[in-house]
Image (cartoon, grey):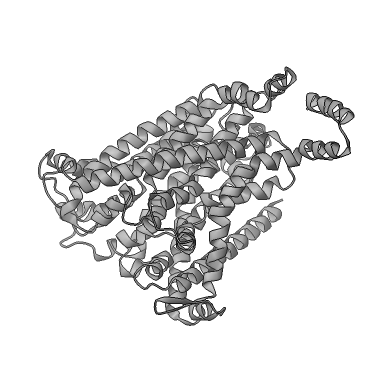
Amino acid sequence: MGMEQQSKGRMLQYYAWVAIVIIYLPVLLLPLFSFNDGRYIAFPIRGLTLKWYIEMFNTPAMHKALWNSIQVAVVTSVLATAIGIFGAKAVTRYRMPGKGPVMFIVMLPLVIPTIVFGTSLLIFVRWIGLDLSLFSIIIGHMIICIPFSIAVLISRFEGFDRALEDAAADLGVGAAGTFFRVTMPLVWPGVIASVLLCFVISFDEFIMAFFLSGSEPTLPVYMYSRMRFPQKLPGVLAMGSLVIMASVVILILAEFFRRRGQDRGIVASGTGLGI
Amino acid sequence: MDAGSHSLSAQIRHGGPWRTVRLLLLWSEPVRGYLQFSPTLIVLSVTMALPFGLMLLYSVWTQSYLDVNTTATLANYQAIGDKPLFSALFARSLWISGSTTIWAVVLAYPLAYYVAFHVRKNKIFWLILLTLPFLTSYLLRIFAWKVILGYEGVINSSLGFLGLISEPIPWLMYSPMAVTITLVHAWLPFAVMPIFVSLEKIDRTCLEAANDLGLSNKASFFRVTLPLSIPGIVAASLMIFIPTVGEYVTPVLVGGPDGLMIANYIQVMFGRANNWPLGAATAIVMMGLITLCSVGFLLLMYTIRRGAR
């Protein structure tokens, strides 16, 4: 490696660190303002206080929104993962004609603007005569989470030797027995990773919930409604800061489980955090 | 597979012809595969395809006061074609997300390059560090830019404190540029991953060969590395362009009236204006335009690649 190569590497390294700082700085501003002793989200910082965290504890509407979000995220992550298991196993185990186009459609929600799903589901839910509720949000979040779940699980299913399942079948274990006694123990880290990832995605999702929530807002919808009232905001930032911290912890856990026992190259095992 | 066909032939020998047909069907790999895939397909058909079909239907209906008139007509599409408001909103949406895509890909490329070629031990650490913010606190990250770009925000108050400006810069906030800056920041981490994957796949011996044949580092980048990473660039571009055309939150929080995009109009139609059919038609035209642009872009990149060969 020549001198030129090395200095180029140095330049790129500086660039990368500056980029990381710029990527993270705005996110870190919010926790900073959640300790700011002033009602307005502007500099200069007036002094440090914990009063917004106290206000957060004394705002029942926020607790309700948090609880709604938790309910939606738990149900969504479990259902999306259950459906993802079938999908991921089918794609990795069988040669199916038309697999490419079908997978393309399944993965579409990763890119198509969420507003398209939000509005069409809104039409659909009202058309079949249902009221908007947490249930309609769960349906919407499933669409978004299933592709993530399948992507995480595919790398897991690809990672173990199929012969183990065949051996169980040879030894006379039934299909269900093979699934629960051979397949599941081998893929469970992927399953946990998928549940955690889907939980965070559902918990953070705004647009779908914005269109599909009736009188019960999720936490992002509640926060959004507060963003127009600057006086109410620091309390929201306090909650937001806690949510960011919890999400980061859960995502790191998800990544830990996703990579557990996988000693393969980064490219082969999918592309990080399920994307 | 061997075991499966073994027991299959045994079962066929014992059973009658009907049983044979049934078993053959069940044992055929595509059938079993799709059977296992069916829960996913059923759920997505009901939650994705059916509502989308219904939206298509709504788009040819019309709103008359509180009721929806179900006579099929192209009036909504006509209105979208006729009114200059629509073409202005569509043009601005495509412009904002187009420039967002270019900036994000250009800024992300060196990051992906650094992780792929210069980081040796901690690739996973870097990848997680870069992707983590993308999956958390979408709303709060956008809101943070309101704090940064606002009249009393970080930039204006710092510049004022340094005495460089006497009053806030007016165009910093509530402009299409503010939307673009915010979107580039939000989507840049997302662009790193596909580019990284395509760079990581490049056979390192190709680069050594290029060097051995006397190509300078610069020349080997432009003639080997960059062309080979085009698939990653294409993937990253589409993964940013397609969703950002329909961006809703960013224009509301930092765009102001001059920075509103087509999704904001769709939301008004489904909300305050209560004209679902027109909103549905607008969403469908948006999807059509996105498809056209994406296909056009893919064809362009395909021609470039063929020309490069």
Vertical side of B222 occupied by A116: above or below? below
Give x and y (percent) for residue B10.
86, 25
Q: Quadrant where the N terminus of chain B lies?
A: top right
Residue A184 % position (x, y): 57, 25
Q: Nearer the viewer, residue A6 or A200?
A: A200
Q: Is residue A44 left or right of residue B41?
A: left
Residue that protrudes farthest toward the front in the picture: B16
Give the percent coordinates (x, y) of residue B159.
Answer: 20, 54
Q: Nearest the camera: B122 or B133? A: B133
**Which quadrant of the figure has residue A200?**
top left
What residue is rendered at 45% in x and 37% in y?
A: A197
Q: Residue at x 61, y 47 (%)?
A: B41
Percent x, y of residue B135: 41, 42
Instruction: Specify the farthest residue to the top.
Output: A171
Residue drawn 75% across the image and 19% down it: A170
- In this rendering, the answer to whether A121 lies above or below B21 is below
Note whether residue A48 is visible: yes
Residue drawn at the location 37% of the way across and 41% of the way down: A71
Image quadrant of residue A225? bottom left
Asked if one can make out residue B99 in the rendered structure from this viewpoint, the answer is no
Question: Number of callouts in the render?
Answer: 0
